[in-house]
């Protein structure tokens, strides 16, 4: 089996994290060779199975990349005798040659929650999300297999007629550094404020509900002046980030709410582990990696009640309505008022998070690709999808 992974859209963040872990578990990979189509910014393992390929077309601009893939990728697949084209980004621009199976992956939920998308207002990004919804759904329908990363995501696409019975759900894993041992806490991060703090890690975007969190914190501080500080960690140089900073200033809380911006990923386990409460207020996710990472620290958590957060946190956290500042404030207050219950919930959250494992995620992913390849070449197997190889005879 010869696999080509189209990694051109994995420029940063979760996309690169996923591929790094997937390619780090090649002992479980049934392929004889794995080609990775990349700009060269992925940290590829030094493994005889892995071969990097640079695009011969302009690929930094999304439009140019799509056109280049449509025109040139089919020949590349044919020249390399590729059996499976794997598109983790979900966009399938090229028409593969006969016999080349296609695997898609659904990771970006925002285009499928237009209520959240339109919170950006009528801007170019909103139009892009509307168009991306159509492109991603089209890719899932064209693929021979789509990998989902949450049951919630699979349910959303099932309602739109974009899945097959064999499409698996393979959630993301949790790296070892986030599996905190309560008896061996990491040293306190120098990025943390000196006083006790509530932590919210996420980029500052409208659907992450930072404005509602600021309002909730103001309400909570009126009730109990001794409330711990609030810390926001994540990309903040955005228009919404500017709005959040203005809201903090307007509320007179600049001394108590800290916007740290991005910090090194290696600092996050310590930040989570020393928080009084970890908070996650997003209202649109697919597989919420940040939530799982925070749960791994074993600290009490206040979490959005919007799916798929309950799918992953079950009954191990305190839930709130992320669009209601009063609901957020009440959830935080319940945790702060009952330390014994809060600590018990933290232990439950840790146990749930520690079940997630990148090695298992990679193994199940390679198994899915290998199973598709084997089924596509079994003369007794029913045709799987639009690109299934022709059977002998």
Image: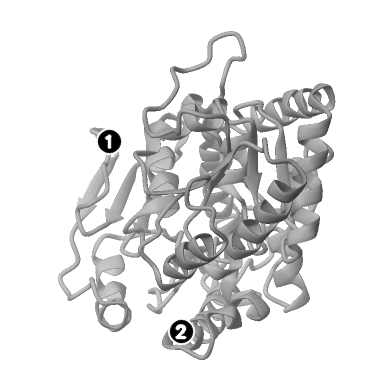
For residue 141, side relative to residue 313 (left or right): left
**Residue in the image at 19% along x and 53% along y:** 40
Residue 51 visible from this viewpoint: yes
Please state the total of marks drawn on the protein image.
Answer: 2
Rendered location of residue 200, percent (x, y): 56, 46
Quadrant of the image occupied by residue 77: bottom left
The answer to whether residue 57 is above or below residue 374 is below
Rendered location of residue 245, percent (x, y): 46, 62
> Where is mark 1, residue-wise?
45
Q: Residues within 10 Å of mark 2 (few under 14, many from 20)?
A: few
Q: The C terminus appears in which quarter of the rendering? A: bottom right
Question: At numbered mark 2, what does the secondary structure look like: helix, strand or loop?
Answer: helix
**Res. 237 mark:** none
Quadrant of the image occupied by residue 333: top right
Question: At numbered mark 1, what does the secondary structure look like: helix, strand or loop?
Answer: loop
The answer to whether residue 223 is above or below residue 74 is above
Which circle's residue, 2 or 1, is located before the other in the chain?
Answer: 1
**Residue in the image at 53% along x and 66% along y:** 250
In-front residue for pair 182/106? 182
Q: Report if the CB atoms under discs 2 and 1 are less than 8 Å apart.
A: no
Residue farthest toward the top in the current orientation of the protein: 183
**Residue in the image at 44% along x and 74% along y:** 92
Rendered location of residue 65, percent (x, y): 28, 76
**Tag in front: 2 or 1:** 2
**Res. 128 mark:** 2
Residue 282 visible from this viewpoint: no
In-front residue for pair 179/6? 179
For residue 168, side relative to residue 74 (left or right): right
**Residue in the image at 67% along x and 80% along y:** 115
Rendered location of residue 48, percent (x, y): 25, 34
């Amino acid at each position: 089996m010869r696999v080509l992974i189209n990694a051109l859209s994995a420029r940063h963040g979760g996309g690169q994290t996923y591929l790094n872990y997937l390619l780090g578990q090649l002992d479980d990979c049934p392929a004889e060779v794995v080609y990775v189509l990349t700009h060269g910014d992925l940290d590829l393992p030094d493994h005889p199975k892995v071969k990097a390929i640079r695009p011969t077309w302009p690929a930094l601009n999304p439009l140019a990349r799509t056109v280049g893939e449509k025109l040139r990728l089919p020949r590349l697949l044919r020249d390399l005798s590729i059996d499976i084209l794997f598109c983790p980004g979900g966009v399938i621009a090229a028409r593969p040659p006969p016999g080349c199976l296609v695997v898609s992956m659904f990771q970006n939920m925002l285009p499928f929650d237009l209520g959240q998308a339109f919170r950006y207002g009528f801007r170019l990004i909103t139009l892009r999300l509307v168009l991306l919804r159509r492109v991603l759904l089209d890719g899932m329908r064209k693929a021979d297999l789509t990998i989902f990363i949450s049951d919630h995501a699979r349910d959303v696409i099932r309602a739109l007629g974009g899945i097959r019975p064999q499409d698996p759900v393979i959630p993301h894993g949790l790296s070892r550094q986030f599996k905190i041992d309560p008896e061996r806490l990491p040293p306190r991060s120098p990025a943390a404020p000196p006083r006790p703090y509530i932590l919210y890690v996420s980029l500052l975007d409208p659907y992450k509900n930072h404005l509602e969190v600021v309002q909730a914190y103001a309400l909570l501080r009126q009730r109990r002046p001794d409330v711990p500080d609030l810390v926001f960690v994540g990309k903040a140089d955005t228009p919404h980030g500017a709005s959040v900073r203005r809201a903090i200033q307007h509320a007179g809380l600049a001394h108590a709410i800290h916007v740290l911006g991005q910090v090194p990923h290696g600092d996050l386990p310590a930040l989570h582990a020393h928080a009084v409460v970890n908070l996650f207020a997003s209202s649109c996710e697919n597989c919420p990696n940040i939530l799982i990472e925070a749960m791994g620290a074993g600290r009490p958590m206040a979490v959005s009640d919007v799916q798929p957060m309950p799918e992953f946190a079950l009954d191990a956290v305190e839930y709130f309505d992320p669009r209601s500042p009063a609901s957020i404030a009440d959830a935080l207050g319940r945790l702060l008022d009952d330390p014994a219950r809060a600590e018990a919930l933290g232990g439950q959250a840790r146990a749930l998070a520690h079940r997630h494992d990148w090695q298992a995620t990679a193994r199940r992913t390679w198994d899915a690709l290998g199973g598709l390849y084997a089924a596509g070449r079994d003369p007794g197997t029913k045709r799987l999808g639009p690109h299934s190889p022709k059977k002998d005879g």
